[in-house]
Image (tube, rainbow, N blue to C red):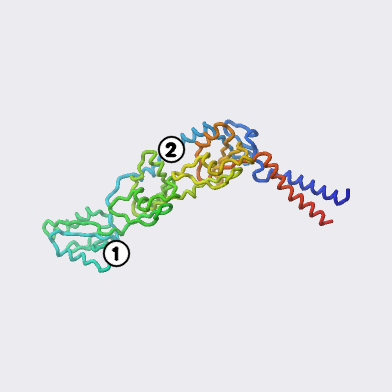
Amino acid sequence: MSSLGIRTGSLVIFTATVLLSGCGAVPGQRMITPAAIQDTGGDYSTEASQQQQIPITDINLALLRKMNSAQTSTALSPQTLALFGKPTAYKVGPGDVLQIVVWDHPELAAALGQPAQNTKTTDAAPGFLIDENGDVQFPYAGNVHVAGKDVASIQRELHKRLSTVYQKPEVTVRVASFRNAQVYVDGEVRTPGAQSVTDIPMSLTSVINQGGGFSPNADRSRVELIRNGVTYPLNVDDLIKRGRNPSDIYLQAGDIVRVSSREDSGVYVMGEVNKPATILPMRNGTLTLSQAISDSGSFDSNTSAPKQLFVIRNSTSDSPQVYHLDATSPVSMVLANQFELEPKDVVYVGQGGLVRFNRVLNLLLPAINAAVTGAVLAK
């Protein structure tokens, strides 16, 4: 054998030895089958997870009962319960326009003024404008502070003041233009934007309906009500399931309602499936493990190891969780159909042993060929 052949053979053996010793560091090559997992009373961990101190929990009936019990026993927070109540009377504010009528005294009607010609739909109706200080001027009543009061209180105040001039005046007050307060609807509704608060109480459902209703991509389980800088997460379908009517949540001036998109709650299905993809939850926000597997085209029959089905949760946090399911079990699909996924979960299907070996060879062969070519050129 020539010296070139000896040196080339030695280089190939050395390269193969180095690569084989480093295969454990290649992502995805250290997944251990459940047969090699040590049982530790329901929670078990692989060699890699023992190094990282991440437990792997078996998906079984006991775990599902525990999760369902925790979910059903979770009561609505006091902050959420405080949102429910009865509507209150509309309180006027700066920018609103009042229509004030004193019956049998037509001379006071001139104070209203005449409507301008060619008025726009956005123009205020003729009447008494509440200024930036919350005051309104009315003949013989003077300067009346009305901001923060309902029309009944304003009517009584005007009656009291006008009684010093007229005998038993009959006063009628109504809001001609609502321009002071607005609420905002954002996110996955058909027509997002601002909506004026009127004397008709605005509930959560009525505001969404006035915004055109939920869009097809809306996640009804992730509706946020932002009030005074505090965000209240609301699950509309869950409220109905609990016997709480979302129509009993009435909005206040300045509230923001935001409807999240289902795309923000996607689940990532990776590994040996036919169509790796981001799977979106249903419109009520739910998505089971079996639905995610089905939407990704199910397992790849040629390369997958169904025993190695994992769900990785909170992967970006300091305390991730990993759940395991042996999909070869006869009851595995029953368990998968009851296991609820959460937003940003990662579903991973492992590889068969032969597939892992073939992929290692594919990594080795190009490096070996390159080493041989390099040795020949050096000679």
| Disc 2 versus disc 1: nearer the observer | 1
Name the mark on residue 357: none
Q: Which of 197 and 304 is in front in this view?
A: 304
Residue that label 2 marks: 74
Give the residue furthest to the bottom.
117
The amino acid beneath tag 1 is Asp
Q: Where is residue 18 in the image (x, y as percent from the top left)?
A: 75, 46
Q: Residue at x 55, y 41 (%)?
A: 293
User: In whole angstroms, how far apart are the C-alphas of marks 2 and 1?
Assistant: 49 Å
Q: Where is residue 4 in the image (x, y as percent from the top left)?
A: 86, 52
Q: Label 1: how many residues lie within 10 Å, few (<14), some (14-19) or many (20+)?
A: few
Residue that label 1 marks: 123
When the figure is inspected, residue 93 is found, relative to residue 287, above or below; the finding is below
Q: Label 2: how many residues lie within 10 Å, few (<14), some (14-19) or many (20+)?
A: few
Q: Position of residue 267 (x, y in %)?
A: 53, 45
Asked if residue 45 lies left or right of residue 337, the reply is: right
Q: Which of marks 2 and 1 is nearer the N terminus?
A: 2
Say which element carries label 1: loop
The amino acid beneath tag 2 is Thr
Quadrant of the snapshot with the C terminus: bottom right
Q: Nearer the viewer, residue 183 or 335?
A: 335
